Image: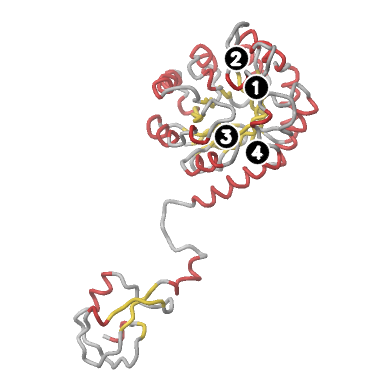
């Protein structure tokens, strides 16, 4: 099973789809946005993702400010979002620039107007933030557009996730769904990432699964890949010292490049589910202990106390039970003057 987003296939037998989450870190500055795209390409990310929203469509003016934004004084949550609200025209230009640079443009669709705009400019999939996991009004609207859905599952329970998966199944879009395990805190403590939910999602829902990671190192991403994640999303910035609420929790270009490199190495390290002697191990076969026999006379009946296991050469006989049973109680055909590696022509 795989899902295609742009020119990339996503699934068990394909490379992990890595998303550089630019979000609002470009501070509504097109020059910065283009530079972020260039750096995401250089880091070999598969996609760069922004956030598209109309503040009035997603927020009441007196809404409660979340914990990680309370340090911003003298501004309401509504005001903070309004100042960072992107221009649709800018996102159209960024999407066009991404196409030129051959990287997939994605954006979180936070409301219906934004979803319609993103559909109009040809976004290949819809990302849905954790805050809208339980917003079935928006999810139903997006499901009807028949594009792949990447849904973050932060601040939710398994019951809520199940309810959302059932909604997607109702619209016959389950084969276009990717669930992203998420801990919605910024930054997230590593102990709250709960990576074991990833295989549980796969088992329970039979869908593709990934991780939207808000921790400040690579550990969770690498663990997620080992547990079967086929998508990774990580916050990305040009400089953590830039103004903005998400800059400090984001990876700078050199850090993101390192993450991509480590993920690709982790993929190679996972190998397959078959156990075999690898190419590199074949040069070390002599390290395995082989059967040896102690000094004995011709005609001696072989007992276990005459046998031992020591390192010899790679052509020796392994001291496994089935080999030992073939040797015990047999007669030696020759004198053994000194301890040596056992061979079948001795019996």
Q: Residue 335, position in %: x, y?
A: 29, 93
Name the residue carrying label 2: 65
Q: Residue 292, position in %: x, y?
A: 33, 81
- Assess disc 4: are there few (<14), some (14-19) or many (≥20) residues with their C-alpha within 10 Å of its C-alpha: many
Comparing 122 with 315, the one in front is 315
Task: Tell which tag, 4 or 2, sits nearer the viewer.
Answer: 2
Q: Residue 203, position in %: x, y?
A: 38, 34
Report how many numbered discs are placed on residues in the image: 4
Q: Who comes first in sequence, dot 1 or dot 4? A: 4
Comparing 13 with 77, the one in front is 77
Circle on res. 45 = 4
Query: What residue is shown at x 26% (from left), y 69% (from top)?
Result: 321
Task: Report how far apart the C-alphas of labels 3 and 4 lie in the structure.
Answer: 18 Å
Name the residue carrying label 1: 51
Query: What residue is shown at x 46% (from left), y 21% (from top)?
Result: 168
Q: Who comes first in sequence, dot 1 or dot 3? A: 1
Judging from the image, what secondary structure is the residue with disc 2 in? loop
Circle on res. 215 = 3
Q: Who comes first in sequence, dot 2 or dot 3? A: 2
Task: Report how far apart the C-alphas of labels 2 and 3 lie in the structure.
Answer: 21 Å
């Amino acid at each position: 099973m795989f899902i295609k987003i742009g020119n990339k296939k996503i699934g068990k037998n394909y490379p992990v789809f890595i998303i550089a989450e630019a979000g609002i870190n470009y501070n509504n500055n097109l020059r910065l946005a283009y530079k972020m795209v260039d750096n995401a390409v250089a880091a070999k990310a598969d996609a760069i993702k922004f956030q598209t929203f109309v503040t009035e469509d997603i927020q009441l003016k007196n809404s409660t400010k979340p914990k990680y934004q309370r340090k911003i004084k003298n501004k309401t949550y509504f005001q903070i979002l309004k100042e960072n609200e992107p221009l649709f025209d800018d996102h159209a230009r960024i999407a066009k620039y991404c196409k030129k640079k051959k990287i997939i443009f994605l954006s979180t669709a936070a409301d219906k107007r934004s979803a319609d705009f993103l559909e109009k400019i040809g976004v290949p999939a819809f990302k849905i933030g954790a805050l809208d996991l339980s917003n079935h009004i928006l999810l139903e609207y997006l499901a009807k557009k028949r594009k792949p859905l990447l849904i973050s599952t932060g601040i939710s329970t398994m019951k809520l996730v199940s309810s959302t998966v059932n909604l997607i199944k109702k619209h016959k879009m389950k084969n276009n769904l990717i669930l992203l395990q998420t801990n919605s805190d910024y930054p997230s403590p590593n102990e709250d990432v709960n990576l074991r939910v990833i295989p549980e999602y796969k088992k329970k829902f039979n869908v593709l699964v990934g991780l939207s990671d808000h921790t400040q190192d690579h550990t969770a991403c690498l663990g997620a890949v080992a547990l079967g994640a086929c998508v990774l999303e990580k916050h990305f910035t040009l400089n953590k010292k830039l103004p903005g609420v998400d800059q400090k929790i984001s990876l700078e270009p050199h850090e993101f490049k390192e993450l991509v490199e480590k993920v690709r190495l982790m993929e190679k390290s996972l190998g397959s589910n078959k156990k075999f002697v690898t190419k590199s191990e074949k040069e070390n076969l002599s390290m395995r202990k082989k059967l040896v026999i102690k000094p004995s006379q011709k005609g001696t009946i072989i007992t276990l106390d005459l046998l031992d296991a020591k390192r010899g050469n790679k052509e020796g006989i392994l001291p496994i039970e089935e080999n030992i049973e073939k040797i015990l109680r047999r007669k030696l055909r020759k004198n053994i003057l000194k301890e040596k590696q056992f061979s079948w022509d001795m019996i």
